[in-house]
Every structure is written in C-alpha cells, then in structure tokens.
Image (spheres, rainbow, N blue to C red):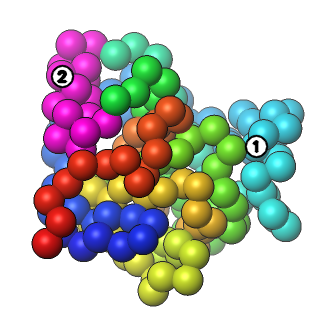
C-alpha cells in the first residue's frame, strides 16, 4: 500500500465479474449533458469541461452490493450516510480537467480494465493505477487522456473526510 498526502494506492484488485452485473443494467450518459445545468458541476471545472467522459449511476443497490459497500466502509473506518456509486468511462482522447469536487470528499476508484490514463493529484508524481485507489477529492486532481478506454467503478463519499480514514500506517 502506498500512502500519500491526498491518495492511497491500495493492494485491492477489483473483481471485474462482480461489477459487470451492475454495469450492464444502465446506459452510458455524457457527463456534460448530465451535469451541464448544475452550478456545482460547472463551478468545479476550472478552465475547460471534460471531454469524452461518460457515467452510469447505480440506483438499485441489491444485497450483494450493500454487503460489498459495508465491508469496504468498515475496512477503512468510513462512517457515511451520504454516498453514491457509479461507473466512469473515459474514451481515448478524453480527459477530466483539473478540479476540486464540490460534493464528494473521497472517491474510492476501482479500475475495471487496464488503466492507461494518468491521474494527476496536486503536485504528486503522475499516477497510473490498476488497483483500488482512494482519492481525496478536495485536492485538485485531473485525468489525462488514456490510450484506450479507462473504465472504473467509483464510490463517491460526501460526508466523510480523507483525513479520517483508518488504515495500517507502515
């Protein structure tokens, strides 16, 4: 596990088969079309809007997903009543400009394909991750264009700070 000021790169390898069931229940929506009328979203983007970014929000949390979430939250000491789960897709040539999230405080990111898109967080070295990453979304971050589709499952937590996570410090 790699612990940095604004992210934690874990040793957790996502179970793609588990997530595929949920991903196939919805259609992809262009993130700009979905959120373009929301002031919080447009205010978060500094100079440019995302390019080739798509999202699928999960609205039906069955027992398997609930158990997965409870286990994950307990492992990291997260006490939350306000979160959402979704899938994010960045196409080659796409990007997410530098921004600070207005609503979420933490994003738990589970890559579901080989990740080739660089994640930049503050002044940290560029990150290309293929295991679960926990991101402090109150720190400026951006996603650079991947060479191939960048697909991940995200848990966005709105009421629990990155600084309050529990984990073994090495």
Side of 114 where 74 appears, left or right: left
Q: How far apart are marks 1 and 2 (CA)?
A: 30 Å
Circle 1 Cα neighbour tier, 10 Å, few/some/many (<14 / 14–19 / ≥20): some
Percent position (x, y) of residue 23?
37, 33
Q: Residue 67 carries which label?
A: 2
What residue is shown at x 59% (from left), y 55% (from top)?
A: 138
Q: Does residue 61 appear in the picture of this structure?
A: yes
Task: Write the start and end of the magenta stretch as one range.
Answer: 62-78
Percent position (x, y) of residue 2?
24, 73
Q: Under tag 2, what secondary structure?
A: helix
Viewer-nearest residue: 5 or 8: 5
Viewer-nearest residue: 39 or 150: 39
Q: Which residue is label 1 attached to?
A: 41
What residue is shown at x 69% (from left), y 66% (from top)?
A: 97
What residue is shown at x 68% (from left), y 68% (from top)?
A: 98
Q: Is residue 68 magenta?
A: yes
> Which mark sits nearer the N-terminus, 1 or 2?
1
Q: Is residue 18 magenta?
A: no
Viewer-nearest residue: 92 or 38: 38
Percent position (x, y) of residue 91?
55, 61
């Amino acid at each position: 596990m790699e612990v940095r000021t604004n992210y934690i790169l874990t040793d957790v390898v996502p179970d793609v088969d588990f997530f595929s069931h949920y991903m196939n229940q919805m259609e992809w929506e262009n993130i700009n079309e979905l959120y373009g009328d929301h002031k919080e979203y447009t205010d978060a983007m500094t100079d440019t809007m995302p390019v080739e970014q798509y999202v699928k929000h999960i609205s039906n949390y069955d027992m398997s997903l609930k158990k997965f979430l409870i286990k994950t939250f307990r492992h990291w000491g997260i006490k939350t009543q306000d979160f959402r789960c979704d899938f994010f897709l960045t196409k080659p040539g796409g990007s997410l400009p530098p921004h600070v999230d207005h609503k979420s405080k933490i994003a738990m990111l589970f890559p579901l394909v080989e990740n080739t898109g660089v994640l930049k967080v503050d002044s940290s070295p560029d990150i290309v991750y293929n295991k679960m990453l926990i991101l402090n979304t109150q720190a400026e971050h951006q996603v650079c264009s991947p060479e191939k589709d960048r697909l991940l499952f995200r848990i966005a937590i709105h009421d629990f700070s990155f600084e309050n996570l529990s984990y073994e410090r090495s």
